Amino acid sequence: MSKKTSPDIEKQVIDLYLKEKLTTIKITKLLKIGRTTIQDIFKKNNIKARTQFDYSILEGFKNNIDPKIIGDISNLEMIPAIDNLKKQSRCSITLRELINNKSINE
């Protein structure tokens, strides 16, 4: 791991991710930790996850959304690999949430 995290933080991340089904974006905001920390925790605990778009590229194309908004790093989340297969091209956030995303608008 790049930064040492406490076992308590690791447990919270794993519980929020696997049991509560929160996205990595919500976990980072809730626990005030970075995404790389979450990725390190997943790797250490052998959690297979995939990075995918919160608002899908396909829906962005259909709704004529600026590719810079769709492609922004803040439109990414990590989800369990099996959930990624189930999700397909569905969005996990609304268009309004995508547009109102603070980091995109800064």
Image (cartoon, rainbow, N blue to C red):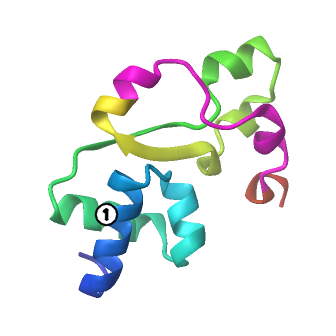
Quadrant where the C terminus is found in the figure: bottom right
Question: Looking at the picture, how far across and down is residue 44, in whole percent?
Answer: 17, 65
Left or right position of 62 against 75: right
* Quadrant of residue 97 within the rendered picture: top right
Q: Residue furthest front?
A: 19
Q: Residue at x 49, y 76 (%)?
A: 33
Q: How many marks?
A: 1
Q: Nearer the viewer, residue 104 or 29?
A: 29
Q: Is residue 100 magenta?
A: yes
Q: Secondary structure at mark 1?
A: helix
Q: Residue at x 29, y 88 (%)?
A: 6
Query: Where 16 falls versus 73 (above or below)?
Result: below
Q: Which residues are magenta?
A: 84-101
Mark 1 = which residue? 14
Q: Residue at x 43, y 55 (%)?
A: 20
Quadrant where the N terminus is found in the figure: bottom left
Characterize the local packing of mark 1: few (<14), some (14-19) or many (20 or more) Cα atoms within 10 angstroms.
some
